[in-house]
Amino acid sequence: MSKLSIFNPDHEIALANNDKNFKPKKNIVRLAHDLLLLPLWYDSGCTIYVSAATPQWESLACSLGLDYNKVESIDYGTITELNLWGWNIAICSSLANKGIPERLLKTEAELATVRRLTQRQTAIEAMRQIKRIIYSPLLPDMPQTLTSISELEVFVRLFGDVVLKSPLSESGKGVYFASANTMNHSILGWVKRTISQQGYIVAERRYEVRYNFAMEFAVSGEKVYFDGYSLFTTNGKSYEKNILIPDTAIEQLIAKYVPIELIENVRNVLISFIKSNISPYYKGYLGVDMFIYYHKNEYRLHPCVEINLRPTMGLVANRFFKNYVTEGRQGTFSVDFYKNPNELANDHQCRQKVSPIEVVNGRLTRGYVSLCPIMSDTQYRVRVEIE
C-alpha cells in the first residue's frame, strides 16, 4: 500500500499523438529511465525500485533526509495514490495494463479535458484575461491563432521576425523562428502539417528576451496556491538550467525591470483564471512561463508565454532549493545529456572530487550532486551545484 510517482517526460508528445498505443522515441525512454527517481525530490514518500538506486545515491538521500519507500518490485494493484508528471491516454492505458486500480486513473472525458487545457489556446485565453483586467503599455501584443498559410503570410508581413508554435509541443519542439527572408519549404511544410493535424498554429512577434522566469502554482480542489518562482535560461528554444536563489531575490531581480505591482497583479489574475478555468478539472502542479524583454527602448513583461499543466524542472529546482539547501547559499540546477555514458561517468567523478558535498543539519551547504543515480549506461543527469 503506497504512493507511486512517475516521471513521464513524453507527456506533451503523447498528448499530441493522442493514441493509447503511443511509444516514445528511444531518447525519451532513456530520459525517463535515467531520471526515474526525480519525483522523490518534490513528492516525498513515493515508492522506488531498489534496483533504481545506487549505494552512493542512497547515501546522499540519507544525508538530506529524503523520504521514500524501497521495494524489490512494485505491486501495482496495491498502489493507493498515483502522481504523474503528466496525464495522457497512453500512460493511462499502460498503467491499466499493469494493474493500477481503475479509481486512480483518469476517465476518457477527463483525459480529453487535460488535452484541451494543455493546448496553447489556454495560455492565449489567460493572456486575454490579463490584458482585459490590467491596462499596461508594458504588456505585449496578443498572440494569434492562424489556420492557413495566407494568414501566416499576412502576419509575417505585419511583424517581421516571428515565433511560430504548435498547439501541443514540449521543451522547444514544435517552435520555429521565422521571417519573410527565412520562410522556407521546411517551415511551410511544418505549418501545413500542424494545421492539418492540430487545427491551428500560434504566432507572435519575436521579442528580445532578457530574463526567462515562471510562476509555479499548486492546484488542489478550489484552492490555488502560488508555490514560488523559477528563474531559468534556455538555448533560445529549450530549457537549459535554473538559477537557485530565493523567491524574494528573483522577485527583486524582476522588479529592477518592471514594476513589482505589475508582477503582483499578473499573479492575482492568473490565480483567478486558474480557479475558474483549470482547477475544476485538474489537480496538481502547473507552471506559467514568462519573460522580461526589451522593446522600443524599455523593458516589458510577457506574462504568459505558455502554461504547463504538470510539474516542471523549475518546480523541482525551487522545491529542492527550499527543502534541501542551506539558507543563504545559491547555485544552479541543470539537465545534462551525454551521448557517451562513459563521459558522463567521468564527469560525475571529476565533479565529486573538485566539488565535494558539505551537508549541515540535513541541508546541502556546498558541492555537486546528481539528483538521480549515475549508472554505467546513464546518459541524462540532473546536476545541482551549490557555491
Image (cartoon, rainbow, N blue to C red):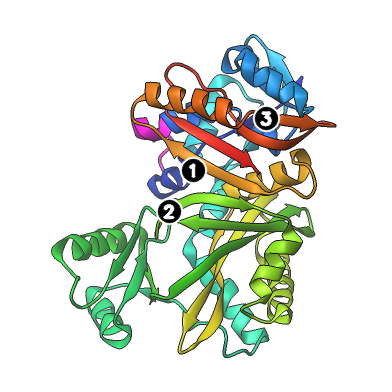
Q: Which amino acid does label 3 sit on?
A: Ile
Q: Which amino acid does label 1 sit on?
A: His
Q: Position of residue 136 (x, y in %)?
A: 62, 89
216 horizontally vs 338: left or right: right
- Which residue is pictured at 57% across the width and 51% down the height? 242
Which residues lie in the magenta part? 19-29
Q: What residue type is labelled 2?
A: Ser
Residue toward you, 331 or 204: 331
Cα separation, mark 3 vs mark 2, equals 29 Å
Q: Position of residue 159 (x, y in %)?
A: 33, 84
Q: In the structure shown, which secondary structural element does the residue marked by tag 3 occupy?
A: loop
Please give the residue where the numbered disc 1 appears in the rendered image: 11
Q: In the structure shown, which secondary structural element does the residue marked by tag 1 occupy?
A: helix
Q: Is residue 68 visible?
A: no
Q: Quadrant of residue 127?
A: bottom right
Give the position of the C terminus as an image quadrant: top right
Q: Earlier in the sequence, mark 3 or mark 1?
A: 1
187 horizontally vs 177: left or right: left
In the image, farthest residue toward the front: 354
Could you classify mark 2 by the number of other residues whose Cα lies within 10 Å: few (under 14), some (14-19), or many (20 or more)? Answer: few
Are circles 3 and 1 on residues that touch, CB within 8 Å? no
Closest to the camera, between mark 3 and mark 2, is 3
- Which residue is pictured at 55% across the width and 47% down the height? 111
Q: Earlier in the sequence, mark 2 or mark 1?
A: 1
Please give the residue where the numbered disc 3 appears in the rendered image: 357
Please give the residue where the numbered disc 2 appears in the rendered image: 238
